[in-house]
Amino acid sequence: MKFSSTELERYDRQIRIKGLGKSGQSKLKKARVMVAGAGGLGCPTSIYLVAAGVGHVAIVDKDAVELSNLNRQILHWSNDVGKSKSVSTIKKLRQLNPEVKVEAIPKAITSDNARKLVKAFTVVVDGLDRWSTRFLLNKACVEEKIPFVHAGVYSLYGQITTVLPGKSPCLQCIMPKPPPEEEKFPVLGATAGTLGLLEALETIKIITGLGEPLVGRMLHFDGETMSFQEIRVERRQGCPVCGSL
């Protein structure tokens, strides 16, 4: 794939990375990534995917910006309150990097449309805040055999793992029963930012083949002690979502 002179200059520092190079940059340019949620996780993830030159980034979010979002959802600003989150997000992303395509999908993810939404993408990223929707997305990605990068945050804590359907445990394996939902849970913006950036890194690694993604591993982050703990996770025999793969 050919690059313009502006693309070569824009991506110069990452093209210099051993194991990435122009071939990895070509993979990024060809890739299509769906970011589910334009919130505390989805905003930093989408910024770094667009900055890295992922060719097509779609932001799926049906909600409108609220004032209480602004401590962590960094692509929404004070004058965006009341506007569509997905539209607010792509407006800034287009200014960041006009070399890539960014798309707003202002829809709710449901059991009826989840598979249709994910099937056109290279990787799907979890920027959601409801476990029920996460599990719908996990199931759709497993059924369509699309890599799914999951992260979640609470207060100063977070976790991240990567699901490669048929090769790793899915979210249902790791959590047979979804955790209880909280309508408004505590979260520090910097915690969401930390996990969102890790999701962007995982996504770039999956697309380019660089390094080792968090497959069969869940990484826990403790912002109070500034520490990480890795936990091995395994596929669960009889999992109703991925057990047949």
Image: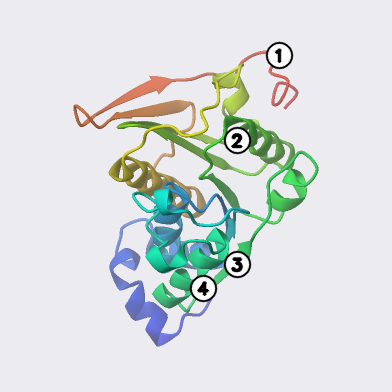
Is residue 17 shown above or below 8?
above
**Callout in the foreground (4, 2):** 2
Distance from disc 2 to disc 1, alpha carbons, whole Å, reads 20 Å
| Numbered marks: total | 4
In the rendered structure, which amino acid carries the disc numbered 4?
Val
| First reached walking from the N terminus: tag 3 or tag 2 | 3
Q: Which residue is mark 4?
A: 100
Q: Position of residue 27 (x, y in %)?
A: 52, 62
In the image, 113 versus 39, the foreground residue is 39
Distance from disc 4 to disc 3, alpha carbons, whole Å, reads 10 Å
Residue 59 visible in the shown view: yes
Residue 102 picture quarter: bottom right
Q: Is 154 displayed left or right of 129 in the figure?
A: left
Q: Which residue is mark 1?
A: 238
Distance from disc 4 to disc 1, alpha carbons, whole Å, reads 41 Å
In the image, 57 versus 147, the foreground residue is 57
In the rendered structure, which amino acid carries the disc numbered 1?
Gly
Quarter of the image with the C terminus is top right
